[in-house]
Image (tube, rainbow, N blue to C red):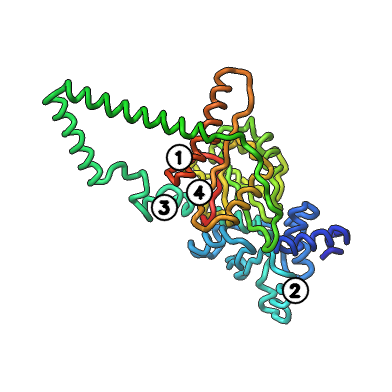
Amino acid sequence: MGQLLGISPADIATASARCRANDTSIAAELIAAQVITETEFCRALAQMLHVPFLEQVEPSLIDLRRAIRFEALSRNGDLPPVAYHSQVLPLLLIAPNLTPLADLVRMIEGKGDLRRRICIVAPTTLRGAIQERSRVSLMRQAVSGLADAAPSMSSRTVLTGRQGFVLGLATAGLLTFAALDLSLFAHVFHVLGSVAFLCCVLLRFAAAMSARPWKLARIEPHEGAPLPVYSVLVALRNEAAIVPELLIALGKLDWPRSKLEIKLICESDDAATLAALAAHELHPCFEVLVVPGGDPRTKPKALAYALPQCKGEFVVLYDAEDRPHPLQLREAFDQFSRSGHDLACLQAPLVISRSRPLLTRLFAFEYAALFRGLLPRLASWQALIPLGGTSNHFRGIR
């Protein structure tokens, strides 16, 4: 394979060392290092095995059940062999990346009938065809999946019958109280409101007393098992102007490229952002996911569309304007590793860029108070923590 692709012995040696450290394959490391492309590897593999190489896959000809398609899209490893109803004869599409070449050779050696049916295809090509075949199912899952599986946790039901009854009873009671004695009602309402406001002030004072300047965490060198796959999800909407800065920031993340997947999620009608992404030559770990048009056009729907397609053991959500610290994934994984499995989510502290305008400085002060004082204090009390909409790291999503 090295001779077919013209890979130098030094590159092969480097890839071999990385594949042992990351528990991947030499091909995956060569592709991640951009020594070869995925298509070049698969074409050379087909040539070595004397089987056809398929450039394009028609999604409608794929024969996979819905559950198997979903499992394939979230699979950390090679895609499963896929039955393909071509015009000549039924084929078996194989998209290798992690499977050792020796295993493929043994699979087809001496099996003439199987060799005639096997066709090698690039994993990205087959994955794209499976995604296209599953668009309707993925969209239905994103929009209605939670409401169908756990109606009580979905916002589709604004009020349950019991909640409506309690709310109506409370409203009627308050109106009756106000009608009977408006002056007493006003005094009680004023006292309760003042007590609630005072509690909020005291909470912030308690948090301010414990606030400390940030220090970069000491990250212990990772030893033992290879690092897991980390999925990075970024939802974009009408943000073509900041695409170059976003790609630079995400490209600085310190994580093995063969164990990193970055999904840039765009709506199908956001032509400007899609064009801005298409103008850049993306690293193989990047994938642009196009969400089909349809309501609601929200960030949660876009993320819900992408989530079943994530391969990572850990997932982090970023906004397009975020500039995460290069070591943030390392620090999050280190914290997850040292904590029990009851730790499901980590919120990275958000820092507003320094700026001279007063409004921006006040905004930065508010964020500093929140992430340096209030949230750490709530966490120490094991109280409910209001998560932000970005820079949240999750484990055990799949």
Between the C-alphas of marks 1 and 3, the distance is 24 Å
Question: Which numbered disc covers residue 102?
Answer: 2
Q: Are marks 1 and 3 in contact (CB under 8 Å)?
A: no
Q: Amino acid under label 4?
A: Tyr
Can you give x and y, in whole percent of width and height, for residue 383 in the image?
43, 44
Q: Which residue is mark 3?
A: 145
Q: Which residue is painted at 27% across and 26% down in the image? A: 191
State which quadrant residue 360 falls in. top right
Residue 272 visible in the snapshot: no
State which quadrant residue 353 falls in. top right
Q: Nearer the viewer, mark 1 or mark 4?
A: 1
Q: Nearer the viewer, residue 54 or 234?
A: 234
Q: Amino acid under label 2?
A: Ala
Q: Which residue is painted at 67% across and 42% down in the image? A: 250
Q: Amino acid under label 3?
A: Gly
- Label 1, residues with CA under 10 Å away: few <14, some 14-19, many ≥20: few
Residue farthest front in this picture: 209
Q: Which residue is mark 4?
A: 305
Q: Which residue is painted at 54% across and 25% down in the image? A: 363
Between the C-alphas of marks 4 and 2, the distance is 37 Å
Q: Nearer the viewer, mark 1 or mark 3?
A: 1
Q: Amino acid under label 1?
A: Pro
Between the C-alphas of marks 2 and 1, the distance is 51 Å
Q: Nearer the viewer, residue 267 or 196?
A: 196
